[in-house]
Image (cartoon, rainbow, N blue to C red):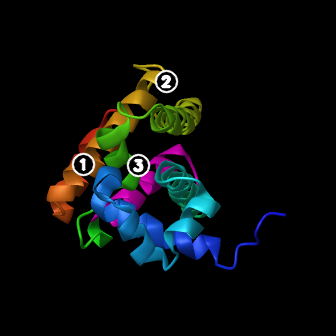
Amino acid sequence: MPKVETFDRKQVLQNATEVFHKKGYNGTSMQDLVDATNLNRSSIYNSFGSKLSMFMEVLSYYQSSGKAEMGKELAHSHNALDTMKLIFEMYLNDILDDKDRKGCLIVNCKSEMANQEPLIKSFMEQNQEQSIAMLEDVVHNGQMEKIFNEDQTANQYALYLYSSIQGLRMTGILNNNEEELRNLINTVLKVLY
């Protein structure tokens, strides 16, 4: 009979997320996870299987939390332009609120681990495909509404926007000057008009 977990899994994932976010995958030791989660090593291995399995669960938790937050914010948009501005505003607010300058866990992980671990690479590819598909839908809607131009296909613009968001997230690690970042966002979005 399997053992019943006697801890709050969500809280453990939140604590583990903080450690992985601060130190990266390679920089995080099992002792760091023990200290952050208040679980002993055997509990971590019994509940998560391995450091990699725990990290994969952390990535999924981080991703789903971000999607839920974005869904709430985007419910307030009136058209595709509002939606696109809200998306970039959310990322800008993340950068400005990031006092430790950790950046985005998923973007950081992509640069650290995507070419080192097949499971992580697969997760990153799926995340990228989902993000581009979401942006493509917004651009397509904007083109149908005659708000966005049709100089490029919705997919081409979506890839451009996705790359711009990734660049914004990386730029924001070292530069959290709101005016400069807003100017950057405005330059990115002008391509759509």
Label 3 vs label 1: CA separation?
11 Å
Tell me what residue is drawn at x 43 percent, y 22 percent.
156
**What residue would you read off at disc 2?**
155
Considering only order in the chain, which callout, 2 or 1, is on the residue closer to the N terminus?
2
**What residue would you read off at disc 3?**
106
Of the residues tagged 3 and 1, which is closer to the observer? 3
Task: Decide which of 169, 146 is in the foreground and name it.
Answer: 169
Tell me what residue is drawn at x 53 percent, y 31 percent.
129
Task: Decide which of 33, 66 is in the foreground and name it.
Answer: 33
Which residues are the magenta region?
74-95
Q: Are marks 1 and 2 in contact (CB under 8 Å)?
A: no
Of the residues tagged 1 and 2, which is closer to the observer? 1
Answer whether residue 52 is magenta in the image.
no
**What residue would you read off at disc 1?**
170
Label 1 vs label 2: CA separation?
23 Å
Label 2 vs label 3: CA separation?
22 Å
